[in-house]
């Protein structure tokens, strides 16, 4: 009798715990979908109102500074059928709703190494299939830049020098690795790309 009571309460606790996890996941998915939709609409409006081509060729360095959560643009890799909106910042809350521009790295268009991070089990999941010479498109309110993948590497999380500017490193994508790992992944998967003329 005592064992049956324990099994009933244990089973009930498992069901309630599973329902709570499902509710949290559903909330995060809805929030992410809403943020992506609103960011796409904002970018579409900004691009439609962009000044004439002769004034947009300048880098956006003298424009207003980005604040955490601001929309940076849209990152696309057509071969992988991947499209994600990019927000300023790389903290946990930003990475729940999209990809994040790593503060301190370059902005596009312009010079330097643009660093963008996202979770391996959501927005950057397709990166497991990326190959050299794949084309990555980054569309911002200031213009569109195209990059070709030069290399990928797997590094420890402390190897922040992967974000330094170097030949063939005009864009760096960062996600956790291994892709199928459960919990906090011990490594980072890095994609380097160079800007196409």
Image (cartoon, helix red, strand yellow):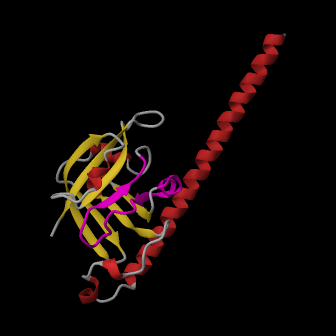
Q: Is residue 30 magenta?
A: no
| Residue at horizontal 41 percent and vertical 37 percent from the top | 185
161 w.r.t. 145: above or below: above
| Residue 193 drawn at (x, y percent) | 22, 56
9 w.r.t. 123: above or below: above
Residue 114 versus residue 86: which sits nearer the camera?
Answer: 114
| Numbered disc total | 0
49 w.r.t. 12: above or below: below
Q: Is residue 108 magenta?
A: yes
Horizontally, is 95 left or right of 171 in the view? right
Instruction: Tell me the magenta residue range.
Output: 91-119
**Which residue is at the far right?**
1
| Residue at horizontal 17 percent and vertical 53 percent from the top | 133
Residue 18 versus residue 56: which sits nearer the camera?
Answer: 56
Hey, which quadrant is residue 145 in on the image? bottom left
| Residue at horizontal 51 percent and vertical 53 percent from the top | 96
Horizontally, is 121 left or right of 166 in the view? right
Hey, which quadrant is residue 167 in on the image? bottom left
For the N terminus, the quadrant is: top right
Residue 197 versus residue 153: which sits nearer the camera?
Answer: 153
Horizontally, is 49 left or right of 34 in the view? left
| Residue 101 drawn at (x, y percent) | 39, 61
């Amino acid at each position: 009798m005592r064992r049956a009571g324990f099994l009933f309460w244990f089973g009930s606790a498992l069901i309630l715990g599973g329902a709570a996890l499902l509710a949290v996941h559903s909330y995060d998915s809805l929030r992410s979908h809403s943020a992506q939709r609103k960011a796409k609409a904002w970018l579409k409006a900004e691009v439609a109102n962009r000044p004439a081509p002769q004034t947009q060729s300048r880098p956006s360095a003298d424009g207003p500074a980005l604040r955490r959560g601001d929309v940076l643009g849209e990152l696309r890799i057509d071969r992988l059928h991947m499209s994600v909106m990019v927000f300023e910042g790389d903290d946990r809350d930003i990475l729940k709703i999209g990809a994040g521009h790593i503060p301190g790295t370059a902005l596009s268009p312009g010079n330097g190494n643009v660093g963008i991070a996202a979770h391996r089990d959501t927005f950057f999941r397709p990166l497991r299939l990326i190959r050299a010479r794949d084309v990555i498109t980054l569309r911002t309110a200031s213009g569109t830049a195209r990059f070709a993948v030069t290399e990928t590497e797997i590094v420890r999380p402390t190897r922040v020098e992967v974000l330094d500017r170097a030949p063939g490193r005009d864009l760096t994508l960062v996600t956790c690795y291994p892709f199928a790992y459960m919990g906090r992944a011990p490594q980072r998967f890095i994609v380097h790309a160079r800007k196409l003329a």
